[in-house]
């Protein structure tokens, strides 16, 4: 390897490979951005045909194409606020996430706030384990419970 580093052909190979990666990553990101821009423009074209306008258009399209309402809303907002893609001065260091965070949201928008801690069913069961065991022992509710290594059967009283 040490001999290769000093070889001109090897330096050229590495530079070309890095350039290819940078260019293709940029093409991928800009393609996604262009797609969201087109999506927003297309929805705006027909939004006046919806009874409640753009908001209803966003909701209906999101459901129909199985995308989040927020994603569709940002696509529409992007198309409205930036009718031309060249209005963004990010160069090759651009991504859809960066556009949403830097250009389409306010610091107090829910997307930027930390998500509340969500409890899973397992968390709820763990927190209420004593109550569940006691309920099962008393034979309430006529429910059969299966817990690790134990089976509690309750008959309807």
Image (cartoon, grey):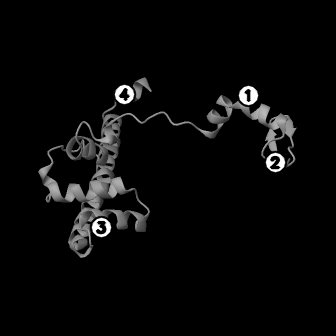
Q: Earlier in the sequence, mark 4 or mark 2?
A: 4
Q: Earlier in the sequence, mark 1 or mark 4?
A: 4
User: Which residue lies most toward the top here?
Assistant: 2
Q: Tell me the tag on residue 102.
A: none
The residue at 30%/66% (across/down) is: 56
Q: Position of residue 145 (x, y in %)?
A: 80, 43
Q: Residues within 10 Å of mark 4 (few under 14, many from 20)?
A: few
On screen, residue 116 above or below 96: above
Instruction: Please state if 54 lies on the left or on the right of 146 as rendered.
Output: left
Q: Are marks 4 and 2 in contact (CB under 8 Å)?
A: no
Q: Tell me the tag on residue 142.
A: 2
In the depicted view, which residue is nearer to us: 115 or 36? Answer: 115
Dividing the picture into quarters, in which one does residue 59 lie? bottom left
Q: Mark 1 — residue?
A: 130
Q: Position of residue 14 (x, y in %)?
A: 35, 37
Q: Mark 3 — residue?
A: 57
Q: Tell me the tag on residue 5.
A: 4
Q: Earlier in the sequence, mark 2 or mark 3?
A: 3
Residue 127 seen in render: yes
The residue at 33%/41% (across/down) is: 110
Q: Position of residue 63 (x, y in %)?
A: 42, 64
Q: Residues within 10 Å of mark 1 (few under 14, many from 20)?
A: few
In the depicted view, which residue is nearer to us: 15 or 3? Answer: 15
Structural distance between the alpha carbons of marks 1 and 4: 66 Å
How many numbered circles does the render carry?
4
Q: Residues within 10 Å of mark 2 (few under 14, many from 20)?
A: few
On screen, residue 142 above or below 56: above
In the depicted view, which residue is nearer to us: 16 or 59? Answer: 59
Q: Residues within 10 Å of mark 3 (few under 14, many from 20)?
A: many
Structural distance between the alpha carbons of marks 3 and 4: 57 Å
């Amino acid at each position: 390897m040490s001999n290769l580093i000093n070889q001109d052909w090897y330096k050229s190979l590495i530079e070309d490979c890095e350039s290819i990666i940078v260019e293709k990553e940029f093409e991928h990101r800009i393609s996604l951005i262009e797609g969201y821009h087109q999506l927003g423009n297309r929805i705006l074209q027909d939004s006046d045909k919806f009874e409640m306008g753009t908001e209803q258009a966003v909701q209906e399209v999101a459901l129909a194409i199985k995308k989040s309402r927020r994603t569709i809303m940002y696509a529409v907002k992007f198309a409205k606020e930036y009718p031309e893609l060249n209005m963004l001065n990010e160069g090759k260091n651009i991504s859809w996430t960066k556009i949403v965070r830097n250009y389409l949201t306010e610091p107090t928008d829910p997307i930027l706030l930390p998500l509340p801690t969500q409890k899973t069913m397992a968390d709820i069961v763990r927190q209420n384990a004593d109550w569940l065991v006691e309920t099962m022992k008393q034979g309430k509710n006529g429910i059969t419970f299966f817990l690790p290594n134990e089976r509690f059967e309750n008959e309807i009283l």
